[in-house]
Amino acid sequence: MITMNDQMTLFNLISKEIKRDIVCYAFGGNAMMFYGYKDETKDIDILFEHEEERTEFIRVIKQLGYSETSALKIYIPEKLRDPYRPLMFKTEESRFDLFVKKIFKTLLSPKMKEDFFAIHEFKNNNTLTVFVLRKEHLVLLKAITERDRDFEDIITITKKDKSFNWQYFIDEVIWQFQHGDSWVLYDTEKMLLELKKYIFIEEKYQKQLYGAVKIEEKIEKKKSNNPHNNKKLK
Amino acid sequence: MDNIIIMVNEQLLAQLEGLHTIETAMQITGLTKQSTLNLLSTLKKEQYLTTTGGGKQKRLYKITQLKQLPRSPGMFDLLNKYSPHMKLNPWYDHQVHGKYSVEDALIDAIKTKSFRVILVSLCLFSHITDWRKLHRLAKQHDCIQQVGALYDVARLYFRTKYFLFKSERKKDWIKLTQLEKKNFPSISEKWHVYIPFNEHDIRGEIV
């Protein structure tokens, strides 16, 4: 487990060693520490936009004593088959889950890029910029990753934060679904059903999810009935 | 047992959330003054509480359910420090761990493309000491036109040192914000930059 201070020291050390500027997005337990939801965490989940940035980041954390580990017992088998599964590096105290471009099937959406909670810039010879995502995005990504403690974290966020914007969350889920994330609705619905045992969530949000599926089915039907499309397919 | 203590703390935090004096905190907790002070002290150690005032002023306790973590100053902190009248309410938390100067803040402000942030950033020109650094950073971030245009506008209203920004004008017009307005036409034409704010904005808000 690493604390907030450890995390800051770690990022500072990394920023001293990197040979180029790196921009990344924090969304796991480490992001929750930036909010003050948590005092310590084991997972440091980071998303990069470019493979070169992840490669440079890995080079530095290997110097700091992290070694590559398998994702076998951490993620469910379906997720492990995904081409966008993370590379994982660990020491005894903490573990980095490093994603590039996507978190499994989930994209780094325009809203995630524009509307974030915080920016932490670690300036040394080069700069390591860590964007901390909004809490709604954290919950969405935790619903997707489905690891042991992710659901506990979701409860913590939604219970502690009264200003949690469910509509914003659902809009993002639907955006992800419309942009090719076929798992997101299933994962979210499963999470909402479980979460309803702990907190009050209005039913209209679930209905919006089902609505998104119906619209998608209609579009699919139209596509299959359209003779032009069929010709193209032939 | 541990769980019970945590639950009590969470309930208490929920009840106490907000600004308090010692008297209001005593009312809510129903404890004596000394016990309440002890409780507030514990909350402060656990980073749920910060204090303001004291001395001649009444001491105020700000209590939140989430920890109030120590911050490193960022762009908004510098802008608010050097802007005498107009203060910004940050919509995200910007923190820089390491050296962060007025020159860096000015470049970051331009990159936000926000009307208010850029308007307030005009104040920073009076506090710039390392003009070469500003020039280098502007080149590095490809915003020398914007910096040059803002510098020329700032010189009209603030005491700033003379520095010759090389006018490496490009053919393309650049927008500081979403607005395509050519206020201060001569400066706008010189740098090929749309300047969104006018004299009234500057006089009314920041001078």
Image (tube, coloured by chain):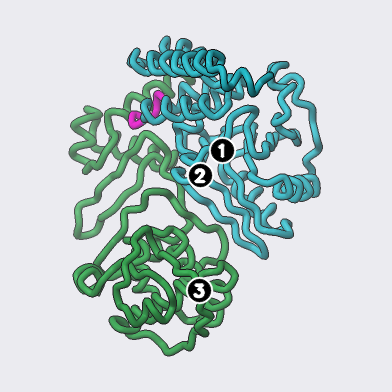
Chain colours: A cyan, B green
> Which residue appears at 40% of the width and 65% of the height?
B176
Badge 3: residue crowd in 10 Å (few <14, some 14–19, many ≥20):
few
- Which residue is disc 1 drawn over? A108
Front residue (pair A221, A159): A221
Residue B45 locus on image (x, y percent)? 43, 42
Q: Is residue B103 visible?
A: yes
Q: Quadrant of residue A83?
A: top right
Badge 2: residue crowd in 10 Å (few <14, some 14–19, many ≥20):
few
Front residue (pair A182, A119): A182
Tell if the residue under mark 1 belongs to the same chain as the one under mark 3. Answer: no
Q: Is residue A119 magenta?
A: no
- Which residue is disc 3 drawn over? B171
N-term mark: 1 or 2: 1
Q: From mark 2 to mark 3, how far is it between C-alphas?
A: 29 Å
Q: Quadrant of residue A7?
A: top right
Dot in front, 2 or 3: 3
**Amino acid residing under circle 1:** Leu
Instruction: Assess whether mark 2 and mark 1 are in contact (beta carbons under 8 angstroms).
Output: yes
- Which residue is disc 2 drawn over? A113
* Placement of A41 over or under B41, stated as above or below: above
